[in-house]
Amino acid sequence: MGNNQLSAAKKAKNDEFYTRMPDIENELRHYSEHFKGRTVLCNCDDPYESNFFRYFALNFNHLGLKKLMATSYCGSPIAGAEYQPSLFGDEPDAPSRHAYKAIVTHVEDTTGDGGFDMEDVKVLLNAPGNEVAELHGDGEYGAGDFRSRECLELLDEADIVVTNPPFSLFREYVATLVEHGKKFVVLGNKNAITYKEIFPLLRDDKVWLGFTSPSDFTIPGEGTTKQVNGLCRWYTNLDIKKRHEDLLLYRRYKGHETDYPKYDNHDAIEVSKVADIPEDYYGVMGVPITFMDKYNPDQFDIVAFRKGDDGRDLVFTRERESTTVFSHTRPATAIAGLFNNPKDTMVNGKSKYARITIRRRPSR
């Protein structure tokens, strides 16, 4: 599944791309210490089908969870429903369907086979201390919609949210988590880095990227997996070792200046690959958005430019200290610290893709 398919799904609000268990395991193994004694919410996840729910149920005792909660937005065939609409679907002719919440406070191997499968889920949710109940919505939002009143009440109860939210609602979804002060580990499109609602969170060290990039998603109803070719990222605000690791730099600017041309409109050099960031250059650089995979705020600053009276660049400023943006950037897309307008990324008359403007911090 390439970028066109992800974009088409976004437009159609058909966001039911199921995350594979190996991809969940590969990422969440880095966060184990954060889950002990915590309440985890998977609020875009059918408890009967979601691998997120299954992961935390399997590892409930190992992680030392206090509580696991999950909410679904549509019926599940395992739960008995016969219809699977698109996420938050509103089809007028759709058959009756149900959304559920599941709350788990105790987990054991109920079938005695040493594993945990969907049969265990059925038994688990009927065990003493656990609960499964229907969700009803609130008139404004449908049953199981993360924005509904009953789902927000569960969100307020949670410590950490972990899920694959709908890409078409990613901006609003993350804004909801931030508004409610929640810790989270969630999947999103790589290009969400450039969203005006998301980039400031990354820039201001309120959100950062996780460790891995899922390689495939499962398409419900098709029984197949489709490649996403690194187009997705994990977004989190849980502190992780990765964001404190320095990016090792091997290239040099001195003697190789022609490899680093300046932008036509700004006093900054173009660095076309993250691996090519020079270790001896302390001016402003424009780097690909994949830089955020390696961003250490102790090693680099994300910067903007301050303009003089004549409209020319004077000096860069740390974005934490200024919200001034390039004067000729379109107001609708202006984001300090990001070249997201073709005029900003011109090198010898040719425009580059979006660039993040950075400067190395002095050696520590």
Image: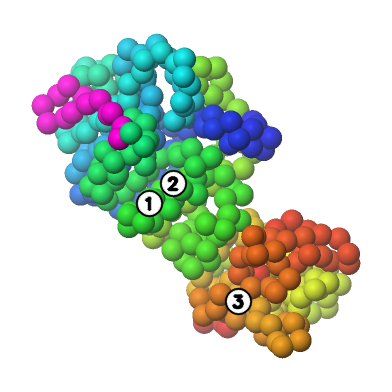
Is residue 252 depicted above or below 43 in this figure? below
Q: Position of residue 147 (x, y in %)?
A: 37, 42
- Residue appearing at x 36%, y 56% in the figure: 179
Which of 149/205 is in front? 149
Viewer-side residue, 12 vs 316:
12
Percent of width and height locating residue 246: 54, 68
| 175 left or right, relative to 362 | left
Which residue corresponds to mark 3? 324
Residue that extends furthest to the left in the rendered view of this protein = 128
Instruction: Find out whether the residues at labels 1 and 2 contact each other: C-beta distance under 8 Å.
Output: yes
The image shows residue 30, relative to residue 272, as above or below, that is: above
Secondary structure state at the residue bearing disc 3: loop
Q: Which residue is mark 1?
A: 177
**Magenta span of residues:** 125-138
Q: Residue 354 is drawn in which quadrant?
A: bottom right
Q: Earlier in the sequence, mark 2 or mark 3?
A: 2
Q: Amino acid at mark 1?
A: Leu
Q: Residue at coordinates 32% horizontally, 21% vertically from top-left?
A: 98
